[in-house]
Amino acid sequence: MDIAAVNALPYEDFVDILGNVVEKCPIVAAAVWSRRPFVSSTALEACINDFIDALPESGKEGILRCHPDLAGRDLQSGTLTRESCEEQARAGMDALNSAEASRVAWLNEEYKKRFGFPFVICARMSDKADILRQLSERNQNERAVERARGIQEVKKICHLRLRGLVLTDAPNKL
């Protein structure tokens, strides 16, 4: 759909369609709906990013906590969102051998113990080896650094999800 169609969406449809561009955070779409009309998909994305950036640190951590563990319980039980399932599968996280699965589970738990939120990475821009490496390396970061890095990854995920929903080269003729 183009940006004109996005701008014409009633509130409920806007939230239904865009409510998972930030994982399990339809409040983000709900908050930016009133900022319509957007002149482009880039302007819509900037509005979402501005909303996230304006959150207090606890709100940013809340956004991070909405993300599932990579190759975790939700993937195994089939309860991931459609988007997360596709993204993790693309990165090979659904095809770990038992040693890799054990390592990821342990690293995920260590990460959550250290930071209080799950490890977030844009799986569509990574492969299994890169994810495993970053999960291990990022476990060494300070909490503030890792919170900021997680939010950067959320924005990458949002960017790619928006690109899948909204045409990028059809500016709105206001």
Image: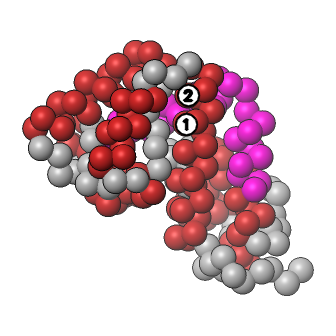
Disc 1 and disc 2: Cα gap in Å? 6 Å
Tell me where the magenta segment starts and ends, as one range: 46-70
Q: In front here: 9 or 50?
A: 50
Query: Which residue is under mark 2?
Result: 146
131 part of magenta stretch:
no
Above or below — where is 115 with respect to 147? above
Q: Amino acid at mark 1?
A: Gly
Q: Quick check: 112 left or right of 157? A: left
For residue 150, the mark is: 1
Task: Pick the residue in front: 156 or 31.
Answer: 156
Q: Residues within 10 Å of mark 2 (few under 14, many from 20)?
A: some
Where is residue 21? Give x, y as percent: 55, 55
Q: Are marks 1 and 2 in contact (CB under 8 Å)?
A: yes
Vertical placement of residue 144 versus 124, above or below? above
Q: How many marks?
A: 2
Q: Is residue 36 above or below residue 166?
A: above
